[in-house]
């Protein structure tokens, strides 16, 4: 009988004292409908702005790395499929005869798909970007070029150069493999720099979220102390801050990622307009300046990662501060 009476008393006490989170609301320290962290503050808007900028910069770094990687692959593919032979004029030799002999030798070489000798007018046109147009180049020793397209089969460039020297002593075969290797190293270095910039930007954003969370906690210090000492769990308090920061950072990440995607899309349209103009060198360097579906997918991943990193950082900061408070 006494045990039954004790159980009834405990049930009555539990009914009078609801869980800590509700108890704080009943005490008047924090109305139930009022969020722990104010949804719209100057600091919150600043956090959205900072996350948007950081996400935009991170997406630009990733997009730049993708552009360089794609352009490098295209350049190396083109270089591996083609090489050139330069035939220089020399006293006592007929350059037309040398060009014809070299072209015939190259056409009969295994691994060569096509060997086309450029005309004198075409060779002179190659000099126009440096000498300008309308010049009389008859008195200049203008070399003749032979464009050699490779079939992809193994080819011995050293042997070809030796045989060329016998039929055309002034003929020089350009070995593009050295340039291809240098290009690959340069592209890899640029990609590594872009990845480093991406890491630095995300680190800077983490630091910004850290101080923003500390500032929000300082603004809600009294409420946090009441919640903490009346029995609210650290998980409950940290979830409130994480929800707040995650909402702000998601908004900023969407803005930054959207601006980055729009930038690359408009840049692609603009570069295609320059294809036939004197500014078309951009097309030669970066192709169509398009990052493709892979690039836009990477931008979306960066935006999601930015929001996730911000939310996780805020949760860690709150847990650390609450442990110190204990």
Image (cartoon, helix red, strand yellow):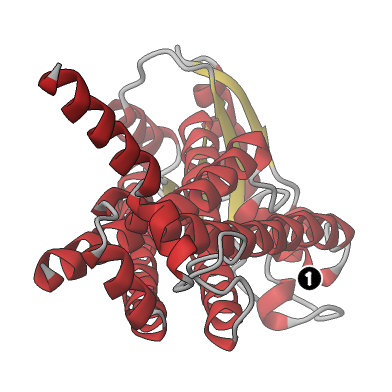
Foreground pick, 224 / 99:
224
Q: Is residue 55 above or below residue 312?
A: below
Residue 223's spot in the image, x, y percent?
A: 38, 75
Under tag 1, what secondary structure? helix
Q: Position of residue 290 (x, y in %)?
A: 69, 48
The residue nearer to you, when weighing 298 against 282, is 298
Quadrant occupied by the C terminus: bottom left
Left or right position of 224 against 42: left
Residue 218 vs residue 294, the one in the foreground: 218
Left or right of 179, for residue 48: right
As drawn, the residue found furthest toward the front would be 1
Determine whether 166 is above or below 143 in the image.
Answer: above
Considering depth in this image, is 227 or 139 the residue closer to the camera? 227
Crowd around label 1: few <14 · some 14–19 · many ≥20 (10 Å): few
Establish if 200 lies above or below 69.
below
Quadrant location of the N terminus? top left
Question: Is residue 212 visible to us here?
Answer: yes
| Observer able to see residue 186 | no
Direction from residue 76 to residue 224 in the image, left or right: left
Say how many tags the image has: 1
Residue 59 is drawn in which quadrant? Answer: bottom right
Q: Residue at x 55, y 54 (%)?
A: 63
Q: Give the residue pinned by disc 1.
A: 279
Residue 33 percent across, percent down from the top left: 62, 61
| Residue 275 position within the rendered picture, expressed as x and y whole percent measured from the top left | 83, 57
């Amino acid at each position: 009988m006494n045990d039954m009476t004790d159980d009834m008393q405990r049930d009555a006490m539990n009914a009078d004292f609801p869980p800590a989170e509700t108890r704080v609301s009943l005490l008047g320290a924090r109305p139930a409908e009022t969020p722990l962290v104010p949804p719209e503050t100057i600091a919150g808007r600043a956090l959205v702005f900072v996350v948007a900028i950081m996400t935009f910069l991170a997406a630009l770094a990733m997009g730049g790395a993708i552009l360089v990687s794609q352009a490098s692959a295209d350049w190396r593919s083109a270089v591996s499929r083609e090489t050139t032979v330069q035939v220089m004029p020399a006293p006592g030799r007929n350059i037309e005869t040398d060009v014809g002999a070299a072209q015939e030798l190259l056409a009969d070489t295994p691994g060569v798909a096509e060997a086309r000798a450029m005309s004198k007018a075409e060779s002179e046109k190659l000099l126009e970007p440096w000498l300008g147009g309308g010049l009389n180049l008859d008195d200049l020793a203008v070399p003749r070029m032979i464009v050699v397209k490779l079939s992809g089969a193994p080819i011995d460039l050293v042997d070809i150069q030796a045989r060329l020297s016998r039929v055309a002593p002034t003929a020089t075969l350009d070995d593009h493999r050295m340039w291809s290797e240098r290009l690959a190293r340069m592209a890899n270095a640029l990609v590594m720099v872009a990845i480093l910039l991406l890491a630095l930007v995300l680190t800077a954003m983490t630091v910004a979220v850290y101080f923003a969370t500390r500032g929000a906690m300082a603004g809600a210090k009294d409420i946090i102390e009441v919640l903490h000492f009346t029995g609210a769990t650290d998980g409950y308090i940290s979830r409130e801050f994480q929800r707040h920061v995650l909402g702000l950072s998601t908004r900023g990440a969407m803005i930054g990622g959207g601006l980055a995607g729009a930038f690359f899309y408009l840049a692609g349209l603009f570069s295609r307009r320059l294809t036939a103009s004197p500014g078309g060198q951009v097309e030669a360097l970066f192709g169509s300046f398009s990052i493709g579906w892979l690039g836009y997918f990477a931008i979306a991943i960066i935006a999601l990662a930015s929001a996730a990193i911000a939310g996780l950082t805020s949760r860690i900061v709150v847990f650390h501060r609450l442990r110190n408070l204990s």
